[in-house]
């Protein structure tokens, strides 16, 4: 700021000196140069400029980030300087040489110097010196930007010239740590640091009569900082926003629960996936569901030769069909309404599609519901998986991908036990064929149909209470996009021939359900336990307090993809396995839940021991 002020004042002195000299040289007289007049005029002009510059706060400008508001302020300061100089010029009347022409020339020279210096600085940073004259919106939603200078500049540039109906008004900038308080970036003042955010919001509310959004940019977009900001914004009822992930067209959008994962969301390299999907025939079961439909979208982006979708839900199938027609009009695809448990129907679809890659996403996933409908869970999750695997073999598929769950590890619920049995079944069927087999285990998917997130959102919208199962319960979480990308990554990995590959994602630390509920309440600008109550309901049927991703005997092995691990896996080799599996499925078809659960416990010993222990506890 001292350098800025010094430059502007020195330029004022040089401008007056140049004007004085030019006036003298153009006068039609031979009088000697009046040094006294020159010194008096230059000193007076520099003094007037100093006062005007300080009053106008021009020294707080960051030159390389100047915008139209800064340029207009500069014009005002030049006019104010001339106004301050006029009394001196009148007082020294008779002692100055051509005072009016000299003043006009000085103002012209000084204006060129002030704008020239700033335009050079702007050119060095953006190669667009004329951007100092671009306007920022004067109305719209008020916001505060929290981040650093580099990220602020990108946001402010995008906001310039936007449609007024969508415009936002940046009231001020908040630094992560106070480094340049009092300065301005493109005319927007730096108001303080993150520690002062609460006070800054209060001042903005008093000054403008409404609560601004707090928009996070750059280094502020980390879970730790976002949680800290949420603590503040929820007390003031302020919305918290962030920049979208699309760098080509970043816009401010509401923060998502996924942004607050305890680890950064992984964006995986899709090049290996592209190699196996482009020009290939792909079939997705359950392709209308939350995860299945995202898989369909990601597959469609890779230009497969043909995409086949199977789903039991008429509405879900209709939605994904309409989306594909709209977004990928040139894609060859077909949608089939059918039940994965219907062997003839599935075999017919597979035979007609002749897929190169099969992604089996169809499943029943709701834990408490499956406890009450064990036979349905067995028929869909086990029999359906076996039918899909056998149909893939018959159709000559080269790859088979199965979506499993963390609940398959030491299962104490029907859903987890059926998914574990499906892992064993698929491994046994497909490894004997030499087909590339990949099974993917991951935790809860944020925003999926069975996720707790939509439930919390509905409860918060209704004013509460938000219900949680247990204050100590924890879960692994990932986004739908990330989960789907992991499935496709697993499909692209080539494991040992004749061996099924089982993969898990490094999901960081599990997140407490209570923390997720508190965070989602704050995301809506409310205070947990004050504006929205949180009630504990107790664990539901079949639910665990904590989930795991691997068994103790399963070792993790690194893969070429960062954060993706291969799990040592052994398929079931029990000679009675196929006979017992067939007996289990027939029992489920005849709707004998007690006998089906007994057989399920035999085929999945971990589940059998859990059920026996639970039964003993109930009897005790």
Image: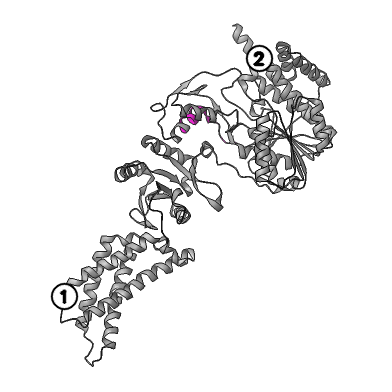
User: Which residue is at 45% across, 31% downward?
Assistant: 521
The image quarter in which residue 562 lies: top right
Asked whether, in this view, residue 219 is left or right of residue 281, the answer is left
Quadrant for the N terminus in the image: bottom left
Q: Nearer the observer, disc 2 or disc 1? A: 1
Circle 2 is placed at which residue position? Answer: 611
User: Which residue is at 64% across, 13% downward?
Assistant: 613
Give x and y (percent) for residue 214. Answer: 41, 44
- How is the structure coloured here? one colour
Give x and y (percent) for residue 8. Answer: 32, 69
Residue 271 visible, this angle:
yes
Quadrant for the C terminus in the image: top right
Residue 295 visible, this angle:
no
Give x and y (percent) for residue 88. Answer: 17, 73
Secondary structure of residue under mark 1: helix
User: Which residue is at 25% across, 68% downward?
Assistant: 81
The image quarter in which residue 499 lies: top right
Crowdedness near tag 1: few (<14), some (14–19) or many (≥20) residues, C-alpha within 10 Å: few
**Which span of residues is magenta-colored?**
507-519
Crowdedness near tag 2: few (<14), some (14–19) or many (≥20) residues, C-alpha within 10 Å: many
Q: Is residue 81 above or below residue 37?
A: above
Circle 1 is placed at which residue position? Answer: 90
Q: Earlier in the sequence, mark 2 or mark 1?
A: 1
User: Which residue is at 43% across, 37% downward?
Assistant: 230
The image quarter in which residue 322 lies: top right
Q: Which mark is residue 289?
A: none
């Amino acid at each position: 700021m001292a350098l800025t002020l010094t430059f502007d004042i020195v330029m004022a002195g040089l401008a007056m000196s140049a004007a004085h000299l030019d006036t003298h040289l153009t006068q039609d007289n031979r009088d000697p140069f009046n040094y006294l007049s020159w010194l008096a005029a230059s000193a007076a002009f520099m003094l007037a400029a100093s006062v005007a510059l300080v009053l106008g706060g021009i020294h707080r400008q960051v030159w390389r980030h100047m915008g139209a508001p800064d340029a207009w302020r500069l014009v005002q300061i030049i006019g104010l300087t001339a106004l301050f100089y006029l009394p001196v010029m009148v007082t020294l009347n008779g002692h100055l040489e051509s005072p009016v022409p000299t003043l006009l020339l000085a103002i012209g020279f000084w204006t060129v110097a002030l704008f020239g210096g700033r335009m050079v600085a702007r050119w060095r940073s953006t190669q667009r010196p004329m951007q100092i004259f671009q306007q920022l919106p004067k109305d719209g939603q008020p916001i505060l930007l929290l981040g650093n200078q580099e990220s602020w500049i990108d946001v402010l540039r995008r906001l310039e010239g936007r449609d007024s109906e969508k415009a936002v008004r940046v009231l001020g900038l908040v630094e992560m740590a106070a480094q340049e308080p009092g300065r301005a970036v493109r005319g927007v003042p730096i108001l303080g640091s993150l520690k002062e955010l609460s006070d800054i919001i209060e001042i903005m509310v008093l000054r403008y009569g409404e609560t601004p959004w707090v928009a996070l940019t750059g280094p502020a977009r980390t879970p730790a900082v976002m949680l800290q900001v949420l603590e503040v914004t929820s007390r003031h009822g302020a919305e918290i926003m962030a920049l979208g992930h699309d760098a080509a067209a970043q816009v401010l959008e509401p923060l998502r629960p996924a942004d607050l994962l305890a680890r950064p969301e992984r964006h995986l390299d899709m090049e290996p996936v592209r190699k196996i999907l482009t020009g290939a025939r792909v079939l997705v079961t359950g392709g209308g569901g939350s995860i299945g439909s995202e898989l369909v979208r990601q597959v469609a982006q890779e230009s497969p030769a043909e995409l086949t979708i199977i789903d039991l839900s008429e509405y879900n199938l209709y939605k994904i069909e309409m989306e594909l027609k709209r977004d990928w009009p040139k894609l060859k695809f077909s949608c089939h309404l059918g039940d994965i448990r219907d062997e003839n129907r599935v075999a017919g679809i597979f035979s007609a599609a002749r897929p190169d890659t099969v992604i089996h996403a169809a499943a029943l996933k709701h834990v408490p519901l499956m406890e009450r409908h064990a036979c349905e869970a067995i028929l869909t999750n086990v029999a359906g998986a076996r039918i899909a695997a056998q149909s893939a073999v018959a159709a000559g598929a080269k790859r088979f991908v199965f979506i499993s769950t963390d609940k398959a590890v030491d299962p104490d619920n029907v859903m987890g036990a059926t998914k574990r049995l499906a892992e064993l079944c698929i491994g046994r069927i497909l490894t004997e064929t030499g087909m590339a087999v990949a099974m993917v285990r991951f935790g809860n998917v944020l925003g999926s149909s069975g996720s707790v997130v939509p439930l919390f959102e509905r409860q918060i919208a209704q004013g509460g209470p938000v219900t949680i199962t247990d204050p100590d319960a924890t879960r692994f979480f990932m986004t739908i996009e990330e989960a789907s990308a992991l499935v496709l990554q697993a499909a692209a990995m080539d494991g040992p021939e004749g061996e099924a590959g089982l993969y898990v994602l490094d999901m960081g630390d599990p997140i407490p359900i209570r923390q997720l509920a508190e965070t989602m309440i704050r995301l809506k600008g409310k205070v947990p336990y004050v504006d929205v109550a949180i009630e504990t309901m107790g664990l539901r049927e079949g639910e665990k307090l904590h989930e795991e991703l691997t068994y103790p005997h399963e070792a993790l092995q690194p893969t070429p993809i960062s954060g993706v691990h291969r799990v040592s896996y052994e398929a079931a080799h029990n000679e009675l396995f196929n006979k017992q599996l067939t007996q289990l499925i027939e029992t489920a078809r005849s709707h004998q839940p007690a006998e089906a659960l007994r057989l399920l416990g035999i085929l999945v010993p971990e589940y059998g021991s859990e059920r026996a222990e639970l039964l003993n506890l109930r009897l005790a």
